[in-house]
Amino acid sequence: MNEEINWREPWWHLSENAKVKAGIQKELESEIGPKHPLWKLKPVATAKTDANDDVIVQLNDGRFACVHLVWHGKIDQYPDKFPSSIIFDTVKSLQTYINEEADEYT
């Protein structure tokens, strides 16, 4: 997947701020445990939105997911459901999601 993603406001790529990226990655790793659907896909924080607690992660199989972090620093009492996530099989489907969220934000 070499297609480029257009990170429209309020989305932004985490390469813009290494400290924020590290904090989000740490939280992601503390919230996603063995019962979560993304566990074996080793999500890596890629982008975030300033509209809410959603982050875009890249999965080890090349797909992407939008994860809504709960920010309590541990695995949820419902570890198979939270943090909630939406998996995108293609960059095009991710871009459509980003565009829809950006349109709602403005």
Image: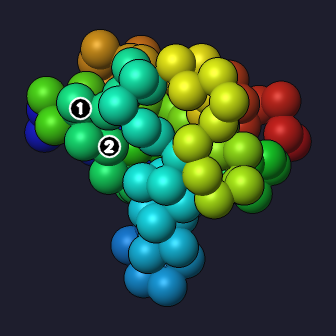
Left or right for 48, reference 89: right
Q: Can you see residue 54?
A: no
Mark 1: few/some/many CA within 10 Å (<14, 14-19, 20+):
some
Callout count: 2
Residue occupying the point 63% across, 59% down: 73
The three-letter amino acid code for the residue at tag 2 is: Pro
Q: Is residue 11 above or below residue 97?
A: below
Residue occupying the point 43% across, 62% down: 25
Q: Is residue 67 above or below residue 21?
A: above
Q: Coloured how?
A: rainbow
Q: To which quarter of the image does residue 64 belong? A: top left
Q: To which quarter of the image does residue 45 belong? A: bottom left
Left or right for 75, reference 58: right
* Residue 41's disc number: 1
Instruction: Please give the residue where the numbered disc 2 appears in the rendered image.
Output: 43
Left or right for 51, reference 99: right
* Quadrant of the drawing holding the C terminus: top right
The reply to whether the C-beta atoms of the residues labelled 1 and 2 are less than 8 Å apart is yes
Residue occupying the point 53% across, 73% down: 23
Left or right for 16, reference 92: right
- Disc 1 to disc 2, C-alpha distance: 6 Å
Question: Helix or strand or loop: what does disc 2 sit on?
Answer: loop
Between residues 9 and 35, which one lies in front from this camera angle?
35
* Percent coordinates x, y for residue 70 in the rendering: 72, 45
Q: Is residue 94 above or below residue 11?
A: above
Mark 2: few/some/many CA within 10 Å (<14, 14-19, 20+):
many
Q: To which quarter of the image does residue 101 belong? A: top right
* Quadrant of the drawing holding the N terminus: top left
